[in-house]
Amino acid sequence: MFLSAGKAEWAPNPSGLSAHGGIVRDKVIGAVEKYIDAVRRNDPTDLPLHRDVIGVFPMNTYKGVEAFVRALEPFSRIVKNINVLRLVVDGEHCVAILDIDTVFGPIPFAEHIQVVGGQIVSVRGYYDPRPMLGEANADA
């Protein structure tokens, strides 16, 4: 199952998961949607994070829920909106393809999120940080 432009759509299941896999996918999607919504609203109390969550992003790594939550405050100051383009789920893993509207302009963003027992245990974000570093017009 994947979510495209805010609508859930069914796709062939290449992993061959049973009906139980559908339950797992629903739980993963629920946790990921709750996470994205909490980040969008800058509401750390609603983040479904495991206490030992690891967040790896191009400009920093956060270990533990306290460090992850502290990182949201400066992030929330630059984010205007988060648009979910697609969620792709395989077992306990979800890739979220996002368009994040920031004070620097839109930033294409992808996150690989692992959910275990309804809690996010790891997030690995992929994006080009140059606009945030003032290098948007730099020659590559």
Image (cartoon, rainbow, N blue to C red):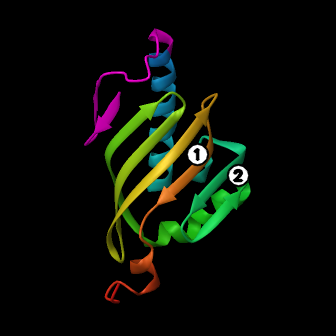
Judge whether residue 57 is colored magenta: no
Q: Does 118 appear above or below 114?
A: above
> In what element is the residue under mark 2?
helix
Q: Which mark is residue 112?
A: none
In percent of width and height, residue 65 lies at: 70, 52
Q: Does 119 appear above or below 81?
A: above
Q: Does 123 appear above or below 31?
A: below
Residue 8, quarter of the rendered image: top left
> In what element is the residue under mark 1?
loop
Q: Residue at x 55, y 53 (%)?
A: 124
For label 1, the crowd category at 10 Å Cα-Cα, with few meaning under 14, some 14 to 19 and many 20 or more, is: many
Q: Residue at x 57, y 39 (%)?
A: 114
Mark sitting earlier along the chain (1/2): 1
- Which residue type does callout 1 highlight? Leu
Q: In the displayed structure, does residue 139 sit left or right of residue 50?
A: left
Mark 2 = which residue? Answer: 65
Residue 78, quarter of the rendered image: bottom left
Q: In the displayed structure, does residue 94 sit left or right of residue 61?
A: left
In percent of width and height, residue 24 lies at: 51, 22
User: Dominant secondary structure of the magenta stretch?
Assistant: loop
Q: Nearer the viewer, mark 1 or mark 2?
A: 2
- Which residue type does callout 2 highlight? Val
The quadrant of the image that shows the C terminus is bottom left
For label 2, the crowd category at 10 Å Cα-Cα, with few meaning under 14, some 14 to 19 and many 20 or more, is: many
Q: Residue at x 60, y 59 (%)?
A: 56
In percent of width and height, residue 39 lies at: 49, 54
Mark 1 = which residue? Answer: 47
Look at the numbered discs 1 and 2 and tell me whether their residues touch, using CB distance below 8 Å.
yes
- Residue 42 seen in render: no
In percent of width and height, residue 83 lies at: 32, 53
Bounds of the magenta segment: 1-20
